[in-house]
Each structure stands twice: as structure tokens, then as C-alpha cells.
Amino acid sequence: MERSFALVEAAVSCGSPTRGSEGAFDALVGAGLPGLFGGASLMPMDKLGPCAVWPKGLRHLDTVMEVCRRLRTNTLEALEHGKYPIVIGGDHSCAMGSLAALGEFYGPEHLAVVYVDAHTDINTDRTSESGYIHGMDLAAACGLCGPELDVGRNKVNLLGNSLHIIGARSIDPPEFGVVEQAGAHLHTAQEVREQGLEAVLGQILPALEGKHVHISFDVDVLDPSEFTATGYNIPGGLTAAEVERVLSAVLDTGLTCSFECVEYNPAMDPSGKDLNTLMGLLHTVAGRLKKIR
Ligand SMILES: [Mn+2]
């Protein structure tokens, strides 16, 4: 039977300092995303807008959590109907919602995450200096934050030992400690440079065996020489060809259960150049997924 897909919107940008990424789903759908995934079903979401008041250290908490709860519900619905979720953010705080659904559906012990990002996003609500929740989603999914950031039934949706971060190069000092505490696997952009991409993949891929694998792809992992339509342009990133290789290698394991793309900001892309780059990458993703039954 052919795999069928659900394109699931996560319309949130106020987990980050930059507005505009809540328009990514509409931009990608307008550029032909459903066609890439064989007429995927669409699960759009209302744009809620940032809330004005929030508790200390958790900016726009109510809006972020409402989006995450809706995303969890929609992702669970897709999974229960046998559809492969393609989640489109929005900022990366939405990963708390998608990981809540995946953790509940498969069980945290059966889930692994390949997190392709310039950041580690593993600040807790206590270590974060900025208060932006898109830097806390992994700590929340691993159960390391307070109850304000719990989504759905599980406190823990992901075991730190099943988390593989690749491409990071903007890491807050306390995050190194949280990575270690969680037992997560961190492969920085520098490590990719020094060891070579294939050597790093050679460490990640065998560890995924036996797991349901979620890919969470933040476009800011790309080097600013190739992609700038996102909240942070951090030098020393991966080329589009390298990102394509990472995504393909993980998809070709046949172990993935869902895919997520976040932090594309169409408001920063008036020419549509980066939309083209991103559609090219998603074309590859769709092609690899359609080959694997
Ligand atoms: Mn990022």
C-alpha cells in the first residue's frame, strides 16, 4: 500500500524573537508542497498571535502551549489514521507538540530524534536567559522542565539517550550541562567539519536501529551563504548539499515515522530564493519517503 502523508501546520512564531515563520505553511503549500507528497491531506491551524502576558522566563507561554496542544491533537490524528506526519512550523517550540504526540503514540522508549539545527534547544526553563521557548523544546520533551511546558499525557516523551543533534554551532554554556545530564548525543557543525559528515552519520545511523525516528529539521542549520530567511543567520553552517545528505541518509534507514521542518520565515524572503532552496530539499525528502514503503 502506498504511504499517505498529512501536512500538519504549527502556526507559532512567538516562541522566538522573530515574527513571520507562522506563514511558512501557507508559503510552502502555495509553492506546491501537497503535490510533492502525492496530494497529502492538509491540517492547517488558526494563527493565534502572541499573547501579551506571560510568567517570568517563559515568553508568550499561553500561545505557545495552545499551538503545541493543537499540534499534538492533529499529529495524533494523522498517526491514528495511518498517515505519515509532515509538520511545518513555525518556530521550534512546536516540537513540544509533535514530540508529545509521537511519545504517546509510540512510547518514549521506542522513539529517537535526529535534530538538525544550528542550536541545541535544550535550555530548561531555569537555564534559559532569553525566555524564548523555542530554545527549550528538547529539555521539555525530555521531562527536564517545569509543568508549565508539559504537553499531553506524558511528562517524558523522549529519552535523552535517543536524541541526536547535528549541525549545532550556537550553544549556550548551560546547555552543554543539560546535554550531558540528558545523555544526548551532540554532533556540532565543527565536528562535522573536523571528522567529515560521513563519519558523523556513521555514529548516528547505527544508534537508530530498532527505533521509530522523528527528523526535526530547522532551516537555520544551513549556512547563511545559502539560506538567510530565518531568525538566526549563524556562520559555519552546513551546505544545502550536506543537509540533503543528512536527511536522505536518515530517511533511507526506513526507520522514520515523521518529519518536521521549522523556522523558515517567508517575510524575510521577498524574492522567494530560499523558498526555492527549501522546496528543493523537501522534494528530496518526499522522493526518499515515497521509495520506502
Ligand atoms: Mn535553531
Image: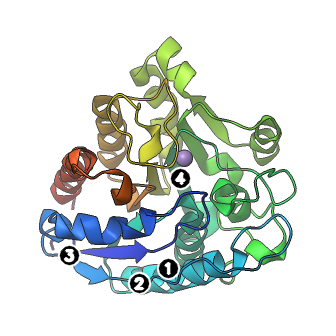
Q: In this figure, which residue is indicated by the disc labeled 4?
A: 113
Drawn side of residue 158 relative to residue 3, left or right? right
Label 1's element?
A: helix
**What residue sits 81% from the left and 50% below the top?**
129
The answer for how far apart the CA atoms under marks 1 and 2 are is 8 Å
Q: Nearer the viewer, residue 158 or 106?
A: 158
Amino acid carrying label 2: it is Met
Vertical side of 163 occupied by 79: above or below: below
**What residue sits 41% from the left and 31% below the top?**
223
Q: Earlier in the sequence, mark 1 or mark 2?
A: 2
Drawn side of residue 47 relative to residue 152, left or right? left
Q: Quadrant of the N terminus?
A: bottom left
Q: In this figure, which residue is indicated by the disc labeled 2?
A: 45
The quarter holding residue 157 reads: bottom right
Residue 95 position within the rendered picture, expressed as x and y whole percent measured from the top left = 55, 64
Q: Nearer the viewer, residue 256 or 61?
A: 61
Disc 1 crowd rating (10 Å Cα; few below 14, some 14-19, many 20+) is: many
Vertical side of 124 occupied by 222: above or below: above
Q: Earlier in the sequence, mark 1 or mark 3?
A: 3
Q: Earlier in the sequence, mark 1 or mark 4?
A: 1
Circle 1 or circle 4, nearest the eye: 1
Say the numbered circle drawn on residue 40.
3
**What residue sits 56% from the left and 20% below the top?**
190
Drawn side of residue 209 relative to residue 58, left or right? left
Q: Earlier in the sequence, mark 3 or mark 4?
A: 3
Asked if the residue under mark 2 is in contact with the one under mark 1, i.e. CB atoms within 8 Å, the reply is: yes
Q: Is mark 1 within 8 Å of ligand 1?
A: no
The answer for how far apart the CA atoms under marks 1 and 3 are is 17 Å
Q: In this figure, which residue is indicated by the disc labeled 1?
A: 71
